[in-house]
Amino acid sequence: MTATPTCGGCGSNRAPAVGASPRPSSGTVLDWARDQGVARIDLHVTDCPEARAAAALYQKLGFADTGKREPLDSDPSLVTRVLAREV
């Protein structure tokens, strides 16, 4: 597969269940991508104060800021940061 999958529109509950973690679902996505022969996943995070915690979590999961910025499709007044991780 030559295309780089992009993950967008993901969200989480601000008050997760006790003991809940985003790591199992992120591992599942990475496992799926690996099984599909994907080399890299791009993830878009809105560049705003409310999304800083999400960006920090993704970086802990191995995603790195590419420096690329793009307007959010649903609201071009907002910008997304593109994070990427090799699978």
Image (cartoon, grey):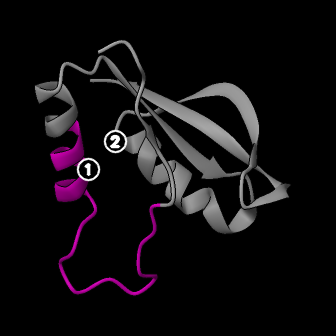
Instruction: Quote the CA–CA distance across marks 1 and 2.
Output: 8 Å
Tell me the SS state at disc 1: helix
Residue at x-position 62% and y-position 62%: 51
Where 16 sits versus 53, above or below? Answer: below
28 with respect to 15 (left or right): left
Nearest-to-viewer mark from 1 and 2: 1
Q: Amino acid at mark 1?
A: Ser
Residue holding disc 2: 61
Q: Earlier in the sequence, mark 1 or mark 2?
A: 1
Quadrant showing the N terminus: top left
Q: Position of residue 20 (x, y in %)?
A: 21, 75
Where 65 sits versus 17, above or below? Answer: above
Q: Position of residue 48 (x, y in %)?
A: 75, 59
Quadrant showing the C terminus: top left
Please say if the residues under marks 1 and 2 sit with CB atoms less than 8 Å apart: yes
Q: Which residues are magenta?
A: 10-30
